[in-house]
Amino acid sequence: MMTDKDYSQIKSIVYKSSAQFLHLYGGNFKELVSQANVACIKAWNTYDPERGTKISTWVKFVVDRELIENLRKNLAKKRNPPISSDNNIEQVISPYKTFDLGEFLRDLSDDARTVIELLLTMPNDLAFLTRRPKQTWTVLVRELVRMKWTKQRISKIYKEISEALV
């Protein structure tokens, strides 16, 4: 059992670790001190002097580890919010803009639809298309030139598709 005298010896670790953590990662100082105090009690209860470490070293290790673990848990909650009736399911599943492909294609010219079809049937996999858009565009332009499209026609279609995606 930790006494007041014992705690007074190691409370500076609690405050220093909380301050360092606040400086590095931000947060609420009172909340960090509270989490550090809980970790300090855990460290005190699990300390084994036979291992050859000082109590202060063990407390510092456990407090820092607990603060980082709490940060990870909080970040996971922010990244994966619980699904409730208040949340829009599309926003929870994907933060990216979604649209109806059929409606999108209907609003484009025949030339633009041809370009989209070429993009979707290119031999490169979709991961390549998203990782290297400049190279994909270069390959696409070569294909369109091979199909006897003019540079002016290609830039007009590029502009049309770009505006439609915004």
Image: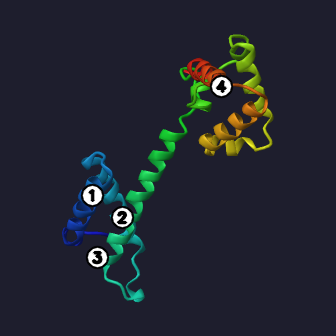
> Which residue has dot 3 on it?
56
Q: Position of residue 121 (x, y in %)?
A: 81, 34
Q: Residue furthest top?
A: 107
- Badge 2 density bin: few <14, some 14–19, many ≥20, Cα 10 Å: many
Q: Residue at x 30, y 52 (%)?
A: 32
Nearer to us of marks 2 and 3 is: 2
Q: Are marks 2 and 1 in contact (CB under 8 Å)?
A: no
- Using the numbered discs, state the Cα–Cα distance from disc 2 to disc 4 in whole angstroms: 58 Å
Q: Residue at x 27, y 63 (%)?
A: 17
Image-based side of 117 in relation to 30, left or right:
right
Q: Quadrant of residue 45?
A: bottom left
Q: Position of residue 115 (x, y in %)?
A: 73, 26
- Using the numbered discs, state the Cα–Cα distance from disc 1 to disc 3 in whole angstroms: 15 Å
> Which residue has dot 2 on it?
64
> Which residue has dot 1 on it?
18
Mark seen at residue 38: none
Q: Quadrant of residue 93?
A: top right
Instruction: Give amino acid for label 1.
Output: Ser
Q: Are marks 4 and 3 in contact (CB under 8 Å)?
A: no
**Can residue 13 be spotted in the picture?**
yes
Nearer to us of marks 4 and 1 is: 4
